[in-house]
Image (spheres, rainbow, N blue to C red):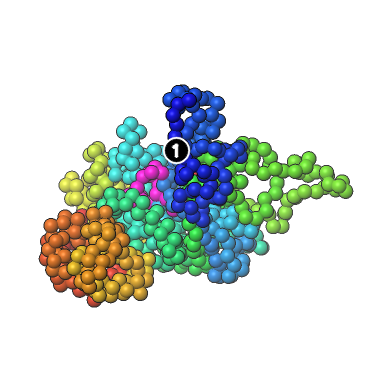
Amino acid sequence: MDKTFDTRAGNGGETHQHVPGKGPHIPEGHLTTNQGIRVSDNQNSLKSGARGPTLLEDFVLREKIFHFDHERIPERIVHARGSAAHGFFELTESLADVTTADLFQRAGERVPVFTRFSTVAGGAGSVDTPRDVRGFAVKFYTQAGNWDLVGNNIPVFFIQDAIKFPDLVHAVKMEADKGYPQAGSAHDTFWDFASLMPETTHMLMWAMSDRTIPRSLRTMEGFGVHTYRFVNAEGKSTFVKFHWKPKLGLQSLVWDESLKLQAADNDYHRRDLFEAIDTGNFPEWELGVQLFDQAFADGLPYDVLDATKMIPEEVLPVKIVGRMVLDRNPDNFFAETEQVAYCPANIVPGIDFSNDPLLQGRLFSYLDTQLKRLGSTNFHQLPINAPKCPVMNFQRDGHMQMTVPKGRANYEPNSLSENGEVSGPRECPMTGFKTFVAADGQEEQGDKLRVRPDLFADHYSQARLFWLSQTESEQAHIASSFVFELSKVGIAAVQARMVANLRNVDDGLAQRVADGMNIPLPKKNPAAREPVDLPASDALSIQKNAKPMLEGRQFGILIADGSDAAAIAKVKKAIVDAGGKAVIVAPKVGGAKLSDGKDMKADGQLAGSPSQLYDGVAVVLSDDGTKALLKESAAVEWLTNAYVHLKAIGHTTESHPLLKKAGVEHDAGVVLLDDFVGAAGTRYYDREPKVRTLA
Ligand code: HDE
């Protein structure tokens, strides 16, 4: 026999006694195959002699490799990259007068939720901070069944009719021949499509705004987008639009920062969500509703069935009715975040669809795509998708049936019970889901036509309303984003066509975009329907609604050998007391020797912890520390980037030479260490004209 040696973990005993890093999530017991057969050796395949061929009979090896080969399932065609968490929804105000939906009846009651946030265009392994719309999908496990509110962080959509969705998605995803760009709209095909489809203009305004570069998943709004219906006990319908409002307020990144974050931390948003929940800082949103009736809808200058339109809060206030708290990370990314299957058609009694033609198409698409993705009609039995209320029907069999139905009764009605009476689960005419039918029966009648309602042809009024609602700084960001994106387009006619469309939104905007690219201002594209003037809405601005605070934000504190120990402790305490998170950054992760002679460990090494990871920075350096870091490009960039990303900078007087080398000039956000916490809860947008040219 060949000479052999034992390669099993530890001393070669039973592996369950020697699991390294054993923690609460590591299962106890013996290692087995999927058939439950104990495995004696998980390090070596079965060979004929130590240097001989591997044997086909090695079922342990074959099963392990077979299972591994099939670990991946098709990623979502859109929204492939996502992060999710468990939590609860708590009703704070009953809506029993307008809906019979069980979760909206009793204030104070909670239902479990699983919420997934996502980017849209990029693949599952792409980055977290491209300019992109974010998905905001909530599964409510109610006692009356699962309700999925599958929304986005923008209240309108690019297109009006589901039949255009494959075109939109083909245009925005990586180009068919090249396979790039990944996760971004700044390329020919997207803008070619967008410029040819003026109905995209309103959403483009949102997409080019800072809404698509959120600071965190915790600082995004969410919207149901479509108009839905509530239906009450009398069968009366009320239209409803759903809104999620983040407790931490809306916050966004600066564009240059979001680009640099793609290098600093691909998982910036995913990590932020996971760590916040892991440390007990549970993200929270309020749920709001806009409620209205047909007469109100008829009086609006836009159609509420058109998903490219929204109703400004100033026209119809958002009534807060509940809150959602995400308080538990998934145990397993694949089993939960990847296998969760949202579907707008998952709806509960008391809520109903409207005739929005985009929504109607979605009602088909999601179930269809889940079958492809999850491979079986029984995907609803996966733990993350299974309702938490009883499920009883006579649907049977299919791939991967996970339950074992008992008895002969697999049809309804049946009289197979012992006493011979009709038995088993039966319909519930009073409490079951019923589609809303208008009393006059008029709603759904009409000839069969492939047309759109008249008001759908107004593509520009709300785009203009959005533009006029922004601050000067926000307008500059929008104009600059158009310039950035269109500058990546290689077809001059597409650039010109897009600017020609923008002339219908605002001539000033169109001129700025044309100037930014240095192209002539094209003739205005004729509008399908003349836009009307709509009053601006302050609720649409991020900056006008900013909530300066340290809570939920994290701050980098740069130290080096010789840093003042007391000053570090003081600023750190002040940040933590104000609800923020303080992260010590030093040239070496082992730490630095402080003024008191003691060593302080760092949370991050300077070169691997650039300032784009933080909402504000404090520089606690001595003369010697400053001198040493003047030769360190990572330290200089740390400050330059914090400054050009419009963040608060707190500093010791000894740090001045470093600030100077980094190009930091004094303003309201550049303060001495003692004033840092007072300045750190916000960004300094009025610094921007000093640091970059905007369109
Ligand atoms: Fe989706 N969308 N969508 N969508 N969507 C999907 O379903 C689709 C639309 C949204 O975290 C897919 O499971 C069509 C609007 C979110 O798992 C797919 C149309 C809004 C998510 C699909 C739309 C959304 C999806 C891909 C036009 C905001 C991710 C994988 C008629 C209200 C959910 C999947 C998650 C996912 C189809 C338009 C939001 C292909 C046909 C409008 C948040 O079924």
Picture residue at 26% right of the left edge, 54% below the top:
608
Horizontal relation, residue 573 to residue 483: left or right: right
Tag 1: amino acid: Thr
Residue 123 lies in the magenta-colored region: yes
Horizontal relation, residue 76 to residue 126: left or right: right
Residue 87, relative to residue 368: is it above or below?
below
Horizontal relation, residue 436 to residue 320: left or right: right
Residue 381, relative to residue 58: is it above or below?
below
* Residue 537 at least partly seen: no
Residue furthest right in the image:
419
- Give the overall secondary structure of the magenta segment: loop
The x, y position of residue 262, in whole percent, is: 30, 50
The x, y position of residue 261, in whole percent, is: 29, 53
Magenta-tinted stretch = 115-133
Residue 405 lies in the magenta-colored region: no
Picture residue at 29% right of the left edge, 68% below the top:
682
Residue 24, relative to residue 411: is it above or below?
below
Instruction: Return the residue at label 1.
Output: 7
Picture residue at 37% right of the left edge, 63% below the top:
250
52 vs 5, nearest the viewer: 5
Secondary structure at numbered mark 1:
loop
The x, y position of residue 481, in whole percent, is: 26, 52
The x, y position of residue 307, in whole percent, is: 45, 52
Picture residue at 13% right of the left edge, 66% below the top:
624
Q: Count how many numbered circles sit on residues in the image.
A: 1
Mark 1 residue CB less than 8 A from any atom of ligand 1: no
